[in-house]
Amino acid sequence: MWISIYNFFSYIVFGYTITSMACLVVLCILSLKAQYNLRINMPDDDTIRYMLKGSPLTPSVSIIASAYNEEHTIINNVKSLFNIYYPKYEIIIVNDASSDNTLQLLIDEFKLQEVPFVNSLRVPSKPIKHVYRSTEEQYSKLIVVDKERGGRKSDGINAGINVCNSRYFVNTDVDCIIEPLAIYRMMWHVVNSHDPVIGVGATMLISNGCTIKDGRVTQAAVPNNPLALYQQMEYMRSFHISKLGWSSLNALPNISGGFGLFDTEVVIKSGGYDTSSMAEDVDMLLRMVTYMKNSGQPFRIAQVPTVCCWTEGPFTPSMLYRQRVRWARGLCEIVSNHRKLFFNHKYGYFGISTLPYIFVFEFLAPLLEIAGIIFSGWLISIGKINWETAIVIIGMIYIFSVSLSFIVISFDYATRAVQWKNTFWSYLKLIFAGITEPILYHVFITICSIRGYISYLFNTTATWKSIRRKTTGAPN
């Protein structure tokens, strides 16, 4: 009887695996097609800059970043934002009631002076106490908002939205390193779209190991730290295949909370960021889509294939564990809070493909893996395991996973998407990551996911802890 049960379970796993592989192959094809179209139709950076720099129709942009206890890096991080090339932008730094010297350092360094403001609560946020502007001409773009403690980044971004006056805003982390031409690349999609663009995502990679000088990545490098290396591989797959593939269907499910451009008015009409959500970036985009679909308005969500932003990834198991548990809990929230969109043709590809895919192949995957491990372990203990079937399924999953990583690496090499330092050794490290990730890193991530699900199921109090950063530019 147990063999029959195991064989039945094996057929389910086999069918699930084949279907998942087929979906990823389709995303690969869509991604390659999108890359090809963009490289033909999208001008180079210099042309985009020339077209937008002098045009009176170029939209203004507010760069909003929330900061909490960032005294060690805040000055360098804010100065790096002045390296951005764009004719109409402002920088809004939201101090979320830091308990250290973050605010005072900003006041002293940038010669800030309090200015009067109208506290218009366009989206929910904790009360704003003070708004500062610089008395120095070179820092005239800078606005610093001091608010009561919200506890999460989303509350800080909402406070920034309440202050900004731009048609679009960029949601970013204060410690992210933005490429100088990034906003030009994103805004090109906005001004060249037939339908209104409500959001633009951009490729992000891990900055661990990169050479950073004056707030810029001057030399890209593949991380030496194993955890950061695996994350680099993970990010490359996500941005080069998954996000670009979905964007070709106008069904991008997520614009990264680390760096993304949004239509300010649509965000406001959608209610702003949910300050209680652990997945505020996905939740915000889905609520924007819901608003646009319910109001019958056409829209476009775009994705930039070139690297526009660098972020430091967790480099210790404890930091990565906290991050991924939080992400998993956020995924539970998305599945629960937006369940009305699932299989609902009213919401287009989001309802009939994107969200069902997320539920079946991202949300259920860790549960199925753990169930398979437990069940197989029990059958091994009683000597009833069907080794031939088990080896075929495990081998098939492993080979496909490695092949997918190799496709991403080959694409990166063929397009020279990033000029890696020590090219040969960089790609060798990426190949190593692709080969060993399914055995080592993936298991750890699965455990984190299950822990996040348990946290959500039992309504464990959720806390948002910042990731401890290394000194800017330190290799790891």
Image (cartoon, rainbow, N blue to C red):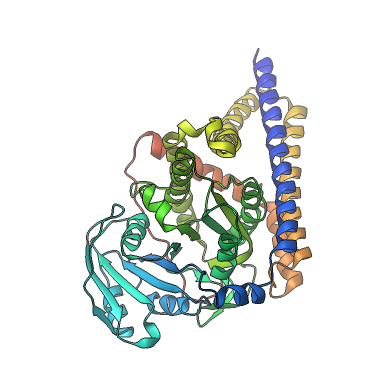
Q: Residue at 60% across / 57% down in the picture?
A: 193
Q: Residue furthest top?
A: 1
Q: Is residue 144 above or below residue 125?
A: below
Q: Is residue 412 above or below residue 458?
A: below
Q: Is 27 on the left-hand or right-hand side of 283?
A: right
Q: Is residue 57 above or below residue 392?
A: below
Image coordinates for residue 397, horizontal then vertical, percent: 71, 39
Q: Is residue 440 visible?
A: no
Image coordinates for residue 372, horizontal then vertical, percent: 61, 30
Image coordinates for residue 164, horizontal then vertical, percent: 35, 65
Q: Residue at 57% across / 62% down in the picture?
A: 191
Q: Residue at 23% across / 76% down in the picture?
A: 115
Q: Residue furthest front?
A: 56
Q: Quadrant of residue 465?
A: bottom left
Q: Is 11 on the left-hand or right-hand side of 168?
A: right
Q: Is residue 56 above or below residue 327?
A: below
Image coordinates for residue 188, horizontal then vertical, percent: 59, 65
Q: Quadrant of the C terminus?
A: bottom right
Give the mark count. 0
Q: Quadrant of residue 47?
A: bottom right
Q: Is 206 on the left-hand or right-hand side of 121?
A: right
Q: Quadrant of the N terminus?
A: top right
Q: Is 61 on the left-hand or right-hand side of 252?
A: left
Q: Is residue 151 visible?
A: yes
Q: Residue at 59% across / 73% down in the picture?
A: 210
In this view, the residue in front, 389 or 238, is 238
In this view, the residue in front, 188 or 76, is 188
